Amino acid sequence: MNYIELKNISKKFSNNQVLKNINLNVKSSEFLVLVGPSGCGKSTLLRTIAGLETPDSGDVIIAGVRVNSVQPQDRNLAMVFQSYALYPHLSVYDNLAFSLKLKKVSDTEIKKQVLETAHFLQIESFLDRKPKALSGGQRQRVALGRALVKRPPLILFDEPLSNLDAHLRQQMRLEIKRIHQQMNCTVIYVTHDQVEATTMGDRIVVMKQGEIIQVDQPTKIYESPQNTFVAGFIGSPEINILSGEFNNLKMNNIEIGIRPEYLRIQEKAGYQNTGTAVINYIENLGSHNLYHLTQNDVKIRVLQSPVEGASVGQKIPLYVKAEKIIRFDAQTKMRLQD
């Protein structure tokens, strides 16, 4: 069942067309991620769903009701921002209780819901503190708590982890997924980080210049990108997009994409030799190395376990898992069917 339906949504700021005829359905209890480069329209689309922006044309339908003229506070949703949006003069308890007080919920019920939410997020120990006395991760938990305390069926996240360090981002990704699973709510999550997108989303919406380019499950987008933009945006390290000649393929009208993990610099069963290459640089990623190579003036990245004796400047054989090669039309950049 679709909980949200977006029909022909367009939005312009001055002469800048930010959203172009967007059509999208979000299923009930789904975790949907909007991803794309800065300025692609993903935050504007989220704010349109929230009611913070009004579309120039098209319909926003939530739970079967057209809500274009419904105020944000009446849309039965919560939103978590990048900036935390906490009241600095209020304690954590009062920040959590604020929206319930506006709705004139009884003090007894407010206390019950605040304490339940605080326990859920493991923030009971600092309910009496002000936001300035909290770490970044603790502030983000309080911002989550302000959204969750209302028990909304829909939560919108606008790049909520951008201000956190890598360790905290990883922790909060797991926390947000746990909340989604336990609350069984619908989530729309905006990020420019493709790692967040692929690890968190049930489906991913890839956007570019105000348009939806591809919508699918993370694995399908990774393995079968619709065009070279999606192929290059999703995946880390970035996919190799090659033209000219590779693996005995003369590519006059096509380009090929091959992910770094499907290349090797030592012989392996199921891989074909594709000539030799020169090692330009080696990045140590811990359990794996990222080898930056040059083959016939073409730069290629290879991701694999460290190879003993491999060094910069060395000429080495290059192998490819041929069935993982993705073919694209050189002019349109669209994926060609196998």
Image (spheres, helix red, strand yellow):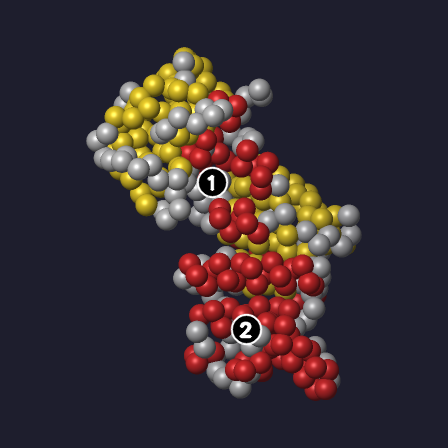
Q: Residue at x 70, y 68 (%)?
A: 151
Q: CA–CA distance between discs 1 and 2? A: 31 Å
Q: Which is closer to the viewer, label 1 or label 2?
A: 1
Q: Which residue is mark 2?
A: 142
Quarter in which the C terminus is drawn: top right
**Residue 86: which disc?**
none
**Residue 240 appears in view:** no
Q: Which class describes the residues within 10 Å of circle 2: few (<14), some (14-19), or many (20+)?
A: many
Give SS at disc 2.
helix
Q: Residue 235, labelled with which disc?
A: 1
Identify residue type, mark 2: Val
The structure residue drawn at horizontal position 56% and vertical position 77%, both measured from the top left corner, is 123
Check the image and name the residue furthest to the left.
313
Residue at horizontal 54 percent and vertical 53 percent from the top? 190
x and y, in percent, of residue 116 in the image: 67, 77
Whether residue 142 is situated above or below residue 257 in the rendered picture: below
User: Which residue is painted at 32% across and 45% down in the image?
Assistant: 284
Q: Nearer the viewer, residue 37 or 270?
A: 270
Is 249 on the left or on the right of 211, as rendered? left
**x, y (%) of residue 131?**
47, 78
On screen, residue 309 above or below 116: above
Q: Mark 1: few, some, or many residues within 10 Å (few <14, many ≥20)? A: some
Do labels 1 and 2 touch, CB within 8 Å?
no
Please, what is the three-letter code of the amino acid marked with disc 1?
Answer: Gly
> Relative to 186, is 333 above or below?
above
Q: Which mark is first along the chain, 2 or 1?
A: 2
Q: Position of residue 219 (x, y in %)?
A: 58, 39
Can the viewer see residue 223 in this picture?
A: yes
